[in-house]
Image (spheres, rainbow, N blue to C red):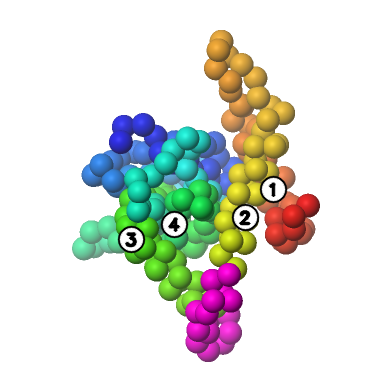
Amino acid sequence: MSQPLFGLVPAGQPVIVSPSETPTPTTFLFAIPAANSPSPSPSSASPSFSHIVVFLLPGIVLPEGTAAAIYLVTPGQDGPASKFLGGIGPGKESAIFKLSASSAAGNVVLGISLEPADSVGARMAEMAAAKSASSNGGALVPVTSSSQAQQPSTIVLAQRIIQNAFNFLASFSGTAGQVEVVPLKAFEEWWKKFESKVRSDPGFLERSD
């Protein structure tokens, strides 16, 4: 899998498509430096972003029966530790993740691993159930067909985030020879406007209009 598969957009930074390391043919590591700090030190720098969008690049189809599991990789005395953040794949080609403040010291390392889709889906369901239980004061909320029926809303939400970006960036597109390009500043401008809109109207992506 030599061609890029995934795109990452840290808030306020340009899109990233090339992994910094590929430990295995199905595992990809993306080291994202702190903004405005070319050579950050883990003890002195922290990323200026708290959200990151991960998406499948146009035309990419994952191997049948697989999905991409997203991990936050942090250093430790006994070796790197991985925290499962979620996943993307067929039917959910993009997602936005919020990074905890405790993860941000210098470089942020995001790991993407191709794994069985059933396994990734089950872990996402467990994470959603735990979050739901936490928001209900610790009371366990059973995963029923009604909660599963909400899944298409998540898919539509992800699609609308990407659609929102494409609609905005299309007006900035130009050509360099025979290649269509978009200025990196356009990504920053889109994110500022998108984040401002989310803060002022958190439910705007959930509406069909």
Amino acid type, mark 4: Gly
- Above-or-below relation of 5 to 149: above
Q: At numbered mark 1, what does the secondary structure look like: helix, strand or loop?
A: helix
The reply to whether the C-beta atoms of the residues labelled 1 and 3 are less than 8 Å apart is no
Quick one: 71 or 62, which is closer to the camera? Answer: 62
Element at badge 4? Answer: strand
What count of labels does the image hold?
4
Comparing labels 1 and 4, the label whose residue is closer to the camera:
4
SS type, badge 2: helix
| CB under 8 Å between discs 2 and 1 | no
User: Between tags 4 and 2, which lies in front?
Assistant: 2
Membership of 128 in magenta stretch: no
Q: Position of residue 79 (x, y in %)?
A: 23, 59
Q: Nearer the viewer, mark 2 or mark 1?
A: 2
Which residue matches tag 2? Answer: 156
**Mark closer to the chain start, 1 or 3:** 3
Q: Which residue is mark 1?
A: 194
Front residue of 183 and 40:
183
Q: Amino acid at mark 2?
A: Val
Mark 1 → mark 3, Cα distance in angstroms: 29 Å
Q: CA distance from mark 2 to mark 3?
A: 28 Å
Q: Which residue is mark 3?
A: 82
Q: Which span is picked out in magenta?
A: 133-149
